[in-house]
Amino acid sequence: MANFFPSEIQQDALQLDTDAFARGFREPLVLVVRLPREGGLELLDALSKTLEGRRTASVRPVASMDFNTQVVSPEELRRITGAAGERRPRVSSIPPPSAGAPGDYIVRLRKRSDGDTAYVDRVSVGRAMNKDIVLRHGSISKFHAWFQIDEVGEVSLTDAESKNGSKLNGEALSPRVPVMVSDGDRIRFGSIDVLACAPSRLWRLCRR
């Protein structure tokens, strides 16, 4: 069985059925951060210090996903462009940790009460210790990216002009252009791999 941190979430997955487990999450998606072999312990330490035992709150929903560039659902994109316009390929899971890797860290898409308060509708990601999700790694910019959630639970990701960029399912994101993120999508911040998953998928991962 793979190691997941915080361990309490994995224990809940082992003890609860999928519906009871999912009810413990208010957000539509959860992030599973792959801790790398090099620098993984530092990343784990920063995530633990900034997220465990700290007060968090749901991000304020944005009224709609009416960004500068139109973001459409996969179904709408296929309707407009046909099969050639199908969304980025999706992965169904992340591989088990490599030998020597500490495991995976489960992160909720929530605001830290002692974190970045500049935008109450954004969950910020970055190397700086005041970000909502702190990825303490050399490939991560101080302010790398941010997530937003709209009133119907759609999640978007925007790269904040980071030095090493962000990718969604292998495709580089244009700076400050939001893209939709769904269950099973693979995100890469710098050289850190992240899986976006619904609570039901997380339940299955924790029990494998």
Image: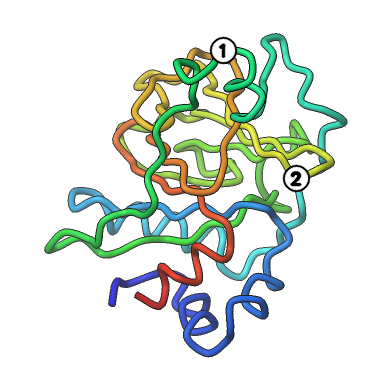
Decide if residue 97 is on the left or right side of residue 124: left
Of 44 and 65, nearer the camera is: 65
Q: How crowded is mark 1: few (under 14 residues within 10 Å), some or many (20 or more)?
A: few
Q: How crowded is mark 2: few (under 14 residues within 10 Å), some or many (20 or more)?
A: some
Q: Name the residue under label 2.
A: 153
What residue appears at the point 38 percent right and 18 percent down from the top-left corner? 163
Residue 158 is marked as none
Tell me the quarter of the image containing the C terminus.
bottom left
Indicate which label's residue lies in the foreground, 2 or 1.
1
Mark with earlier residue (2, 1):
1
Of 71 and 167, nearer the camera is: 71
Give residue 167's position: percent from left, percent from top.
Answer: 40, 27
Q: Return the residue found at the far right.
A: 63
Does 121 sit above or below residue 203?
above
Q: Mark 1 points at which residue?
A: 81
Give residue 95's position: percent from left, percent from top.
Answer: 26, 56
Task: Measure the alpha-carbon separation of dots 2 and 1.
Answer: 25 Å
What residue appears at the point 33 percent right and 53 percent down from the top-left corner? 34
